[in-house]
Amino acid sequence: MYRHFESKQQLAAEAFDYAWRIALDTRFEGTQEIPNTVDRLKQVVGNFRDRRAGLVPGGCPLLNTAIDSDDGNPQLRAKARRALSSWLDRLQSIAEEGQRRGEVRSDVDSAKLATLIASTLEGSLMVSRLQRNGDPLDLACLHLEEYLETKVRARQSKAGEDKS
């Protein structure tokens, strides 16, 4: 196998890229068909929770790589940081689109919302894996879904004005 790669580090980097593409595509699967941006964000949360089984052997490539490459492989750590940035950018973009369309409250900081979603999902996944129990991830997803409904979704008046 090493004949195709210059080093173990390059092999690890290529494996990460492959696994991350699958994971990211799965996280956003089905969101294109959803017209409302808050509902799209809720779909991302649901996808993270529900479409994990057998997705990538070994679990979440971002979580695994972030932990494993922290000290030993700067190239892989840089890839993990870029992957996280791409995920945050996509979440932020959905929230900003929602603000332009009046679906997301105007006082929501889209960058902070993206960070909240990603860190809550990844953190609860780590706790679930450590406890070998899906309850922490389920609880985090439920909390995010409620948060998106109560703190993010813009409320419309009868005249269609944003009441956020």
Image (cartoon, rainbow, N blue to C red):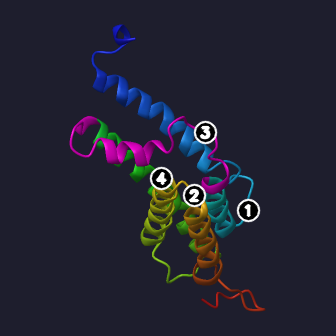
**Crowding at label 4, few (<14), some or many (≥20) Cα neighbours within 10 Å?**
some
Question: Which of 111/3 is in front?
Answer: 3
Residue name at image x 51 percent, y 65 percent: 117
Asked whether, in this view, residue 2 is left or right of residue 158, the answer is left
Q: Quadrant of the N terminus?
A: top left
Q: Marks 3 and 4: in contact by CB < 8 Å? A: no
Q: Earlier in the sequence, mark 4 or mark 2?
A: 4
Q: Quadrant of the C terminus?
A: bottom right
Task: Tell which tag, 4 or 2, sits nearer the viewer.
Answer: 2
Residue name at image x 46 percent, y 41 percent: 61
**Crowding at label 1, few (<14), some or many (≥20) Cα neighbours within 10 Å?**
few
How far apart marks 3 and 2 lie (CA) works out to: 18 Å
Residue 141 seen from this side = yes
Provide the secondary structure element on which disc 3 rests.
loop
Question: Which of 93/122 is in front?
Answer: 122
How far apart marks 4 and 3 lie (CA) works out to: 17 Å
Residue 55: mark:
3
Q: Earlier in the sequence, mark 3 or mark 1?
A: 1
**Crowding at label 3, few (<14), some or many (≥20) Cα neighbours within 10 Å?**
few
Instruction: Give yes or no for residue 64 being in the magenta stretch.
Output: yes
Provide the secondary structure element on which disc 2 rests.
loop
Residue 118 in the image, given as x and y percentages of width and height: 48, 61
Tag 3: amino acid:
Leu
Question: Which residue is tagged 4?
Answer: 87
Question: Which residue is tagged 2?
Answer: 133
Question: Which residue is tagged 1?
Answer: 35
Instruction: Give yes or no for residue 66 being in the magenta stretch.
Output: yes
How far apart marks 1 and 4 lie (CA) works out to: 20 Å
Residue 56 in the image, given as x and y percentages of width and height: 55, 36
